[in-house]
Amino acid sequence: MRLSSEDIVAVLKQMPSSILFKRINREEVYCSTGFEKTFGITKLNGLDESSIMFFDSQSKQKTAANTLPFYIAATEGAVSQQYRVQTQCRAMNCHVEGGVITTSEENWLVLYVRPDGSDLVANNQQGSAAGKHIVFNQLLSDFSSKLINASVDELDNIIDQALAGFGEFSNVDRCYLFEFNEDMALMSNTHEWVAAGVTPFIDELQNMPTSSLPFFMSHIANGLFKVDDVSSLPESAAAEKAVFEEERIFSILCVRIMVNDTPYGFIGCDIIGSPYSWNTFDIQYLRRIGEMLGNTLQSLHNRKILQKMQLELLEANKQLEQLANIDGLTGIANRRLFDTTLKRDIQRCQEQGLALSLLLIDVDFFKQYNDDYGHVAGDKVLIKIAETLSNSCLGSDDLVARYGGEEFAIILPGTDNIAAKAIASRILRNVTLLNIPHEASAYDKKLTVSVGLISQSNDALRSVYQRQGEQSAMWLLNHADEALYRAKNDGRNCSRS
Ligand SMILES: Nc1nc2c(ncn2[C@@H]2O[C@H](COP(=O)(O)OP(=O)(O)OP(=O)(O)O)[C@@H](O)[C@H]2O)c(=O)[nH]1
């Protein structure tokens, strides 16, 4: 015996399973009480196929006309496929299975729309909970291990993936992370996942004043904000109600995230279109995801502090290193840096086929200057001389150093005798141009210096290096010192080599 069309409608409408059905070649769609319950709707009759939207559960794209389940069932006789099913109330990932039922009068397309995980619920409530726990724990451990090893650059991506994983697992419509600013005056949506067909709001939720949502803030301060039905929010939550209603949010669940014992922000999820009663598992799962993110952000925060401390230490070391190489009075290189640089430059110049010159400069009658003008004035002269010497050497590799007391030294890598003599003359001239009065000086009663110079062509330098090795620096210094002695003997304010 074949069933009549009325029988088919009457029977299928009463089915506790989630069923959608329609006549072939007719627009009107019917649903079972099971479907109404699952999707939280009260009246679907009289609606057409476009009232129920199907999305690809992977790509989130709206399903093309020729891959719609009613279409496949009609053309191929059967359908068995995964979809994201959206009614005007809710969207859920579902397995859709169905085919054609033939009556004496006409043919019907019948779809069994089974939300993911509902088979476990149907079979056994305890089994369902256990199965969900296993899936959740797997999800949590996957993301925990990714997050533990994540670099700062990878973090955003992994948080996005975690929200998507959790959103799909919980079958919610939107899942997000908000961050407070330092004084908690503002909050911003930093990451958001939305189910297929759901409008993202992240761009509109930046730098929102927390004072505009007082009811929410007072609840989240205690760790949890849970609303099963936005329409039942009290008068004191008028601001929140207006925001949620504008976004078509019916149910919302948020848990606070703590980093370093201070509120960092919150993770939350929304149900759009119909109220939903959050159960203890929903809260527990969201809390654990929040804790996972909190721990990650905390370790990231600690890592950043460590990195900052490391940088500060490196900078401090650099400064110490510089201080250890700088003469405190004049600010030019000290004897320590001079000694290491001379050794290094001798080695480098003889290897690279370069000449090298060395100058020793001594202030004339400086003892007398100190006696006549005082030690403080003497110090100022040394600072002026250091500055003048530095300005007289133009080579980028030249090193001007305070060799000791009122004596200075200059290393001129790659500089031959002719060029070095020109530099020595420049130094003598520039010092007299300072016009520093010095009564004891034979030169117009002005302060002068004497210069001892030694220049080595590359051949000569190489042979010194071969003979003297480590002592080459000392050998050069002795020769420069002898030249300086000659300059002093020859009346001062001159250079000798
Ligand atoms: N003000 C001041 N004087 C210094 C400093 N270092 C060394 N002197 C002085 O420099 C003087 C060097 O004197 P001498 O070595 O006798 O030589 P001089 O008087 O310059 O005579 P000649 O080198 O022969 O021209 C000493 O009186 C030191 O006390 C310093 O840092 N500041």
Image (tube, rainbow, N blue to C red):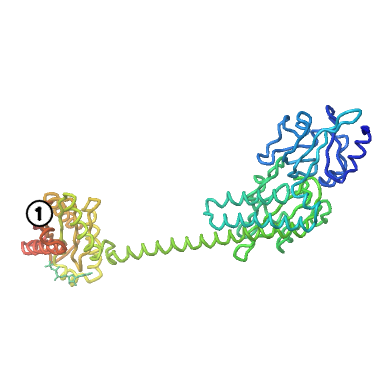
Residue 279 point in image, percent of width and height: 78, 57
Residue beneath the point at 68% across and 52% down: 166
Where disc 1 sits, the SS reads helix
Compared across the picture, whether 381 is left or right of 18 comes to left
The x and y percentages for residue 214 are 74, 58
Query: With 5 as the anchor, is 419 left or right in this view?
Result: left
Residue at the (60%, 59%) spot, across then down: 182
Q: Is residue 153 above or below residue 96?
A: below
Q: Is residue 280 above or below residue 208?
A: below
Q: State the quadrant of the N terminus.
A: top right
**Which residue is at 16% across, 68% downward?**
366
Kindly identify which residue carries mark 1: 460
- Residue type beneath disc 1: Ala
Q: In which image quadrant can residue 294 be found?
A: bottom right
- For the C terminus, the image quarter is bottom left
| Depth order, front residue of 477/406 | 477
Quadrant of the image occupied by residue 328:
bottom left
Label 1 Cα crowd, 10 Å radius (few <14 / some 14-19 / many 20+): some
